[in-house]
Image (cartoon, rainbow, N blue to C red):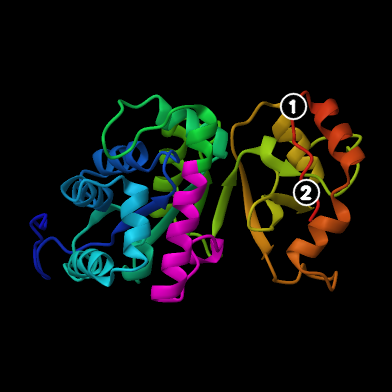
Amino acid sequence: MTELPEIHRPGEAAGSAIVVNGDLGSGKSTVSVEIARRLGVRRICVGDLYREMARQRNMTALQLNLHAELDDEVDGYVDRLQRDIAGSGQQLVVDSRLAWHFFTDAMKVHLMTDRAVAARRVLGRPASSVESYSSSADAVERLRERSESERTRFLVRYGVDKTRLRNYTVVCDTTSATPEEVVDRVIRCYREPAAEVPVLFVDPRRIYPTGPVPASADGGGAAPLSLGYTGEHFFVVDGHRRLSGALRARESLVEARLVAEADEPVPGTGRSATGYFGSRVRPDAVHDWAAAHGTTLPVPARS
């Protein structure tokens, strides 16, 4: 069995932790390494342990995920590790897909990215017996399968949904932003905690309009956007001018607040976030918005 990393006990270098999660290819490793370096604290990567467990069992990471749905020993071992780390009271940066569930007092950072971008990132890594892909399409599909396997396992075992943004303190889209831009925002939120969480930093090119292209645009000093989230797509509830300004200025991230996600009602509409998106995001408006800002915004599939 893989050995546990050395864990210091409570009372030794106490401080608040930062836990970072996100699917494969979201930039967890790069971002968590740089946060730890900038803050001068220790970093622990639970994923490295998980990959070593897969290697020792002669499995891919996806195969170990699927095996874990049937064998509680896998998750039980990793759970004990994370509880031990959480109970140490250290100021740490923890790279883990589930640490946010165990670290109740930590700052919880969730990274997300476009799946095609994530696929390109993982394809650029050296191939290994644990994780390898034959093509971009194969990587996209296997990343989707792995994420859904984890989501199902976490729902069944812990009763928590990793895709719900309200689990986190900060949500950051890494699709176009550089690691330095992401780290800057995380550290800012760490040093100056927001009154309302989660704080969203979203790629403006991935936000869907729910109204026409505004005649004028607000610059970067304007208030954060108000966004809804379907579980897959972000959309504007309030702030089309601010979003237009971000796109025209070629900003990689725009700050926003979450007003509704999934089945939560969008204030003042009587509709859930998913229902509001379905009724207000029209193909013609999406095309007009993308053309006006020189971007590409896929028309979402209708269920």
Residue closer to the observer: 35 or 276: 276
Q: Position of residue 257 (x, y in %)?
A: 64, 57
Q: Quadrant of residue 228?
A: bottom right
In the image, residue 34 sits, relative to residue 125, either above or below, namely: below
Q: Which residue is mark 2?
A: 239
In this view, 75 is above or below 287: below
| Helix, strand or loop at mark 1 | loop
Q: Is residue 181 magenta?
A: no
Q: Position of residue 176 (x, y in %)?
A: 55, 31
Label 2: state its secondary structure: loop
Find residue 131 and report its image quarter. top left
Q: Which residues make up the magenta segment?
A: 142-168
The residue shown at (48%, 35%) is: 139
Q: Is residue 89 left or right of residue 71?
A: left
Q: Residue visible at 47% across and 42% down?
A: 142
- Name which residue lies at 74% across and 50% down: 235
Q: Is residue 134 above or below residue 200?
A: above
Mark 2 residue type: Gly
Q: Which residue is mark 1?
A: 295
Q: Are marks 2 and 1 in contact (CB under 8 Å)?
A: no
Location of residue 292 by image quarter = top right
Does residue 169 appear left or right of residue 258 in this picture? left
Q: Where does the image place residue 145, in percent across and percent down from the top left? A: 49, 50
Whether residue 221 is visible to the viewer of this picture, yes or no, is no
Q: Earlier in the sequence, mark 2 or mark 1?
A: 2
Q: Residues within 10 Å of mark 2 (few under 14, many from 20)?
A: many
